[in-house]
Amino acid sequence: MSGVASAPSAPSARNPWLTATAWRRLFRDRPILPLLALLALLVALSELVRPGIVNPNWAGFILRTAVPLAILAGCQTLTMLTGGIDLSVGAVASGSGFLVATLVGDQGLAVAILAAVVVASLAGLLTGIGVGVFRVHPLIMTLGMGLVVFGLANWWQLVMVQTGGGTPDELRWIGSGSFMGIVPHSLLVFVPLALVILVGLRRTGYGRLLYAIGDNPVAARLSGARAWQVIVLLYVISAVMAAIAGFLVSGLTNVASVTLADSYVLPSVAAAVIGGTSIMGGRGGYGGTIVGALILTVIISLLSSLGYPEAVRQVLFGAIIVTVAAAYTRITAES
Amino acid sequence: MSAAAAAVDDARARPADAAMAFVRRNGWTLGLLAFLAVLLVYTRAIQPTYGVTGIQGLAISVLPLALASVGQAIVVISGGIDLSIGSMMALTSVVAASQMKGQGEEFGVGIVIAVLALGLLLGAINGSLVVLTRVPDIVVTLAMSFVWAGCALLVLKTPGGGAAVWLKELVKGSLVNEWVPKAAIALVIIVAVIWLPVQRSRLGLSLYAIGSNQLAAFRSGVSVGRTKLASYMLTGLFAALAGLSLTANTGIGTPVPGPYTLTSVAAVVLGGVSLAGGRGGVAGPIVAVVILQLLRSDMTFLNVNTNLATVANGVILIGVVMFGSLIQMRRARA
């Protein structure tokens, strides 16, 4: 028994890349690697169960569907870094998309989008004041703000029932169109946004403050960080990002409804968590979240291509999230 | 030093001070009760016909959410959160409804017991996943909410099934006095039989201990994992009770989860339970649920647009919690 066990370990003593510890260390330092491996595995699995499905068109479809989810998951990533969460993204995204669709007929696209962004930032400002100044738990604050925005959007729907328009062509172009049927137009919005977040988190003082406040609020305060200002701005940013995602979703589905993006809320939290952002704050990043959003989108597409009924899909979806989160926690655990 | 100790002893001895201490400890719940009383008077003022029927309707419509909120309160007190309550309610409700349909009354008793056991099992699965994987509670229960909702859809594709007559009779109408609805009695009995003994026991102390400071609890010899598991099992049990009450109310089972998960979290916070864990009880959340439901029916009566009623719910939720945290901040400064 011991002979069998020691045989493979002999060469690994010479080559550090073959030891389990080395792999563990690599995964711990570069947590995005196992995620990319999982993504590759899922793509391979898709090809295996449905030969020929993996082609440029499929990739374009996956990207197009993943972009709004990745943006909303970005809202969760940023807020989770400070130990918060934003459950109002669904209502804010749907409300913004809906507002643009109702205003575009009379006011033109630019004004409509500006109005939606202003309304979203107001909601974010109120959330930020509640969380940052009045110390309301983010879960409760964003839950309540989600109810407020949803109710107001419904009320607006009744007011605008005569004029109600559709999704403007420009949003449809950016949300569901693609260059040569492969590269989605929504990347024009997503790539700059993602770069700003990635660089902002690593290279700017504001980004570092988010980590500092989430990691140790007391230490951050003692070193002179004005936490409430950081948090108020954070929830405004999150609401604006949710609004952008709302525009893309309404362009993607060609529907403007007040419940449009609700189904994205829980997956957006799941994408951020799978991507390695700690819900306790202070750890994580946007790179992992993007891969997490891709993983979830591929899983959903894989499950629906298998032709399982909705019930089985839901069960598998939940089970996969738990499994991935558990494996991830195990791999990256400090010990 | 000893003089101070004597003064404390004196204070304990005087009944008036003991009453003050009770008020201080349960201030939030008593405040909620006072608000509820005002609200009832107001309801009576705007709807002079509000009486026995109104109270009975209120008790019946409150029951599922009240039970869900008690379950949520237990897990929040012990430092966790359960976002799968709504899905567990849907699953237990459809299991009960699909199995009871067309069966005898006595068979229904067995089904109810089996469904309660199912609730414990679902809670045990949630709890052991939280304990074993060390993934944060909110993530595990969020993912499990998909699993349980999917299972509910597997059991029943569309709303259907049936319920034993005695189960429906259990929550309908009133007992002893027409002002005492059976649903309210059921709620009180359930909480008195399940939660109160637990709260008084060693387990109850452990639940509060791990919620308040997990490390300190561990160092004082509390088995953190086992206690956490127990808290999730209790929550599963209450979710099953809430699911059964849904079936009893409607006579059928609905596989799509209602808005119970997030509403229960809101009710728990309104009821004075700290989301950080370790503080609060189950009475506050129950009163909060009654207040929320009564406000909703008042707004319906006043013809307030339902959308504005949703806005009002959100504003109330935020406003009350802000008020609570302001009180705490002032206390911390004083």
Image (tube, coloured by chain):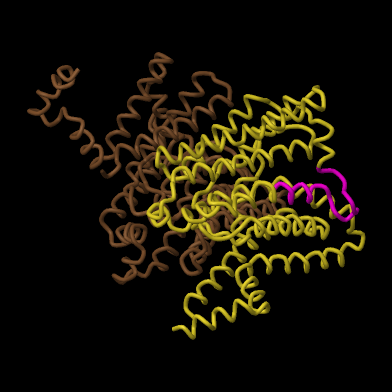
Above/below status of B160 relative to A250: above
Residue A72, image x and y in percent? 46, 46
At 38% from the left and 20% from the top, the residue drawn is A45
Looking at the image, residue A34 sits to the left or right of residue A267; the answer is left
Q: Nearer the viewer, residue B72 or A117?
A: B72
Query: Relative to residue B22, is residue A286 drawn left or right?
Result: left
Q: Quadrant of the C terminus of chain A?
A: top left
Residue occupying the point 59% across, 70% down = B323
In magenta stretch: residue B48: no
Residue A32 occupies which quadrant of the picture? top left
Residue B3 coordinates in the image, percent (x, y):
49, 86
Please tell me whether residue A37 is drawn above or below residue A237 in the rendered image: above
Residue B294 in percent (x, y) is at 77, 58
Choose between B254 and A208: the one closer to the eye: B254
Task: Give residue A212's position: percent from left, percent from top.
Answer: 32, 60
- Who is closer to the viewer here, A155 or B175? B175
Q: Is any atom of residue A68 visible in this view?
A: no
**Which chain has been coloured yellow in this picture?**
B
Asked if B316 appears above or below A299 in the picture, the reply is below
Bounds of the magenta span? B171-190
What color was chain A assigned in the picture? brown
- Is B173 inside the magenta-drawn segment? yes
Position of the N terminus of chain A, as image quadrant, is top left
Residue at 69% of width from left, 50% of height from top? B191
Residue B104 is left or right of residue A32, and the answer is right
Residue nearer the viewer, B181 or A198: B181
What residue is rendered at 88% in x and 56% in y? B179
